[in-house]
Amino acid sequence: MGAVTRIESARTGPTQRGVMVTSDNEKYWYNLTTKAVERGFQSPAIDRAGPFDTEEEAANAPALLAERSRRWAEEEARADE
């Protein structure tokens, strides 16, 4: 079962303190093998990056992951000084 995530869509089920919730199975994922955006758990976890709230965010996953990796490498380099 995926983590419960806050969303603003009214199409999902129960609420917690008035906020609609959904599982990660309702989110978008970027498949690292096929380079395709998927909705829900269509592929094995090892092949997925995400979750993302929108299809557009998932499509931009490669750039986002590259930027995060660059920042982490810079932080590590500074920590090693």
Image (cartoon, rainbow, N blue to C red):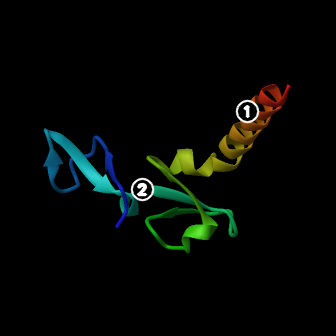
Quadrant assignment, res 49: bottom right
Quadrant assignment, res 63: top right
Q: Nearer the viewer, residue 25 or 37?
A: 25
Q: Which mark is residue 41?
A: none
Residue 43 on image: x %, y %: 54, 73
Residue 77 on image: x %, y %: 83, 31
Residue 50 on image: x %, y %: 53, 54
Judged from the image, the secondary structure of the residue bearing numbered disc 1 is helix
Judged from the image, the secondary structure of the residue bearing numbered disc 2 is loop
Task: Give the Cα separation between the discs numbered 2 and 1.
Answer: 25 Å
In the picture shown, does residue 52 fall above or below 44? above
In the picture shown, does residue 62 fall above or below 42? above
Badge 2 amino acid = Lys
Q: Are marks 2 and 1 in contact (CB under 8 Å)?
A: no
**Which comes sooner in the sequence, label 2 or label 1?**
2
Q: Locate residue 61 relative to residue 15 in the image: left or right.
A: right
Q: In the displayed image of the protein, which residue is found farthest to the right? A: 81
Q: Is the residue marked by circle 2 packed among few (<14), some (14-19), or many (20+) residues within 10 Å?
A: many
Q: Locate residue 58 relative to residue 28 in the image: left or right.
A: right
Quadrant of the image for the N terminus?
bottom left
Q: Residue at horizontal 36%, vertical 56%?
A: 3
Badge 1 amino acid = Arg
In the picture shown, does residue 43 fall above or below 76? below
Q: Residue at horizontal 68%, vertical 45%?
A: 65
**Label 2 belongs to which residue?**
27
Name the mark nearer the viewer: 2 or 1: 1
Quadrant assignment, res 24: bottom left
Quadrant of the image for the C terminus?
top right
Q: Locate residue 4 relative to residue 57 in the image: left or right.
A: left
Residue 2 on image: x %, y %: 37, 62
**Label 1 belongs to which residue?**
71
Q: Residue at horizontal 79%, vertical 37%?
A: 73
